[in-house]
Amino acid sequence: AYNNPLGTVYYGTQSNKIDFSDTNEIFEITGQTAIASDMLTFFTRFDNGSGGGSPAATCSDGIQNQSETGTDCGGPCTACGGGGDKWLEAECASTKVGGYSTTQTAVSGYSGTGYILNVGDTTSAGSSVDKATYVLSGMTAGSYNIWFRVNVNATTNDDSWFYGLGTGTPANTMNNYSDTGWVWKKGGTNLSLAAGANTISVWNRENGLKMDKLYLTTSATTPSGTGNAGTNCP
């Protein structure tokens, strides 16, 4: 027996064939005693009956093809990156250094397993000691709003951070908040993401700032509560 994924199977001298109307069909060939030395040669043409030499591209074949911008997404398939939305738990960064290396849990109300905390204290972009990077894959190209779920300790003295695309000196500053508890704050500058892979980074500014979650979206949706579950945690 031979498990054929799809297409037309020829056997013997190609004068005999079996056609399949669906995938993963199990077939068994018996009575082929005329083939010498028990040898049965299969000439397989995966063509879905079309007569071509390769399988037709689909949005579930595990291959980036047919103008897809990611594997089985974008182009003629469903948009990559969850249709333009990406929820990230701050503590599940791709890389974390400085104070961000330790996941914090002292202040309740966070989502996921905790949050990250600004330990360093600086107002100079590029001199931060706490840094977290988030590698995004399969994103649809576009201009994204970025939201941060933070706790600013009800004071403008412990309320700020930097963010930006890539891993170099941050281009954007978030500052001058005095809210109580966990709140969502929208980045003042949108991020222009390319199709496929992108990296965004967060750096400390004033110490004491707590960050729980990030949300990237191409829509005008304002997040609330803890938002949707993050997709970046193991």
Image: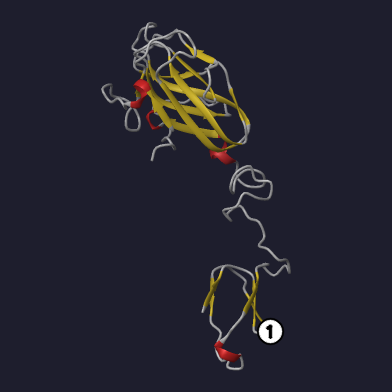
Q: Is 60 drawn above or below residue 178 in the view shown? A: below
Q: What residue is rendered at 40% in x and 17% in y? A: 129
Which of these two is toward me, 214 or 224?
Answer: 214
Quadrant where the C terminus is found in the figure:
top left
Q: Position of residue 114 (x, y in %)?
A: 32, 28
Q: Secondary structure at mark 1?
A: loop
Q: Is 228 drawn above or below residue 167 in the view shown? A: below
Residue linked to disc 1 = 13
Q: Is 35 drawn above or below residue 84 in the view shown? A: below
Q: Report which quarter residue 79 is drawn in.
A: top right
Left or right of 153 in this view: 134 = right
The residue furthest bottom is 34
Q: What residue is rendered at 64% in x and 70% in y? A: 7
Q: Position of residue 93 (x, y in %)?
A: 42, 31
Left or right of 82 in this view: 77 = right
Q: Position of residue 61 (x, y in %)?
A: 58, 56
Specify whether residue 74 is in view.
yes
Which of these two is toward me, 87 or 198?
Answer: 198
The residue furthest left is 106
Specify whether residue 227 is in view.
no
Q: What residue is rendered at 65% in x and 50% in y? A: 65
